[in-house]
Image (cartoon, grey):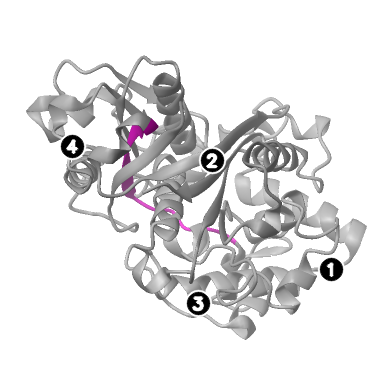
Amino acid sequence: MAVCIVGWGHTPFGKHEGEDLEALITRATREALDHAGVPADQVDGIWLGNLNGGFVPDTFCSSLVAQADAGLRWKPATRVENACASGSAAIYSAADAIAAGRARVALVVGAEKMTAVSGKEVAQALAGCSYVREEASQGLTFPGIFALMAKAYFERYGDHSAALARIAAKNHANGTRNPWAQMRRDLGFEFCNTISEKNPVVAEPLRRTDCSLVSDGAAAVVLVDESMVAEFSRAARFRARAQVNDYLPMSRRDPAAFEGPRRAWSQALAGAGCDVRDLSLVEVHDCFTIAELLAYEAMGLAEPGQGARLLEEGVVMADGALPVNPSGGLKSKGHPIGATGVSMHVLGAMQVLGEADDLQVPNAELAGVFNMGGSAVASYVSILERLR
């Protein structure tokens, strides 16, 4: 049974000083139920994507979703965690329940409250998403881990710092049109490509503009089985979806190959019966700009080492043949861990349904979504299309 997105909710991403995790969850939940036109008591199950890891004291948070509406009381609720892909993991878990006939209407929420702790505590919590025995325990944080990927890529294919700056500049320019984005400011290529007091090196060769933002936020979707879509005013169908998990230790993988994402893309495109260039747009997991560059090659848009050409030729720009991150991506929109995968699916659904407003890619028919957990360890790729 095919699964469809029939409604969504989305908070702005950024620093929400007046809202805790519960407030973010309930806000997105109410918006999604209202947007879908689904009474809360018709929901068959709840899935919450949330990493936490020490950001907030709420370890057992799946039933916080029920705070949004009394109709959600007694509904089975489960928290799902798969690092930065927790949101997609929650969506896939709900979709599996629908496909198995255990649910017809599923509510999926992704949420994270990251800014209530110090930057050092954020880095420590995220470092726990690495292979701690070899990576976090040796002092590596995620900027350092993705810097190792960038170094390996540069050693193999030459210095691509300018390409990373073009990615950052592109995504910040795109993000100016996104009302949910944390940073709606066009920084320009020169600023992103220049090391300065405002753009220092964070982990060589990555600069501040090569790194995504620490954010609070939530997003939610209502999923139904395809047989129900006549009851709704909109429906974006999962034409295909694929999950691939690789080894956790980086020492067992080629850091410049993105092998897990490559396999996930291959499986999803095969399942959808299409080629990557048949897609109208793609939302990819640009936690660091090197991740987006590697994603170009993993999805088959360019041969290894040739991803920079897509920027130079304008292919991945907002008005290009295949816009990548027309939303501004994690780089501009922000990256509240548990919310990210759900947000990416919301944005993909909006595009194929023609409801993306200022972000709309003309005549969007197929949207690709690539959400990643850890250092290319958990890879989720979805292909979305309009059904109604």
Q: Position of residue 277 (x, y in %)?
A: 69, 59
SS assignment at label 2: strand
Which amino acid type is shown beneath numbered disc 2? Answer: Arg
Within-10-Å neighbours for mark 4: few <14, some 14–19, many 20+:
some
How many residues crowd around disc 2 within 10 Å: few (fewer than 14), some, or many (20 or more)?
many
Q: CA distance from mark 1 to mark 2?
A: 38 Å
- Residue 44 appears in which quarter of the rendering? top left
**Relative to 13, does residue 121 appear above or below in the rendering?**
above
- Compare marks 1 and 2 and give the one earlier in the sequence: 1
Q: Is residue 72 above or below residue 385?
A: above
Foreground tag (1 vs 3)? 3
Q: Is any atom of residue 335 visible in this view? A: no
Q: What's the residue type where badge 3 is placed?
A: Ala
Left or right of residue 246, residue 360 in this image: left
**CA–CA distance in space, label 4 to label 3:** 36 Å
Q: Nearer the viewer, mark 1 or mark 4?
A: 4
Q: Which residue is mark 3?
A: 173
Give amino acid for label 1. Asp
Query: Mark 3 to mark 2: distance in Å?
Result: 30 Å
Return the x and y of residue 286 as percentages of the image width and height.
Answer: 59, 56
Residue 214's place in the image compared with 56, above or below, is below
The residue pinned by badge 4 equals 38
The label on residue 239 is: 2
Residue at x 69%, y 25% (from the top left corner): 133
Q: Position of residue 58 (x, y in %)?
A: 28, 28
Q: Which residue is mark 1?
A: 159
Q: In this orientation, which residue lies closer to the viewer: 246 or 241?
A: 241
Boundaries of the magenta span: 211-226
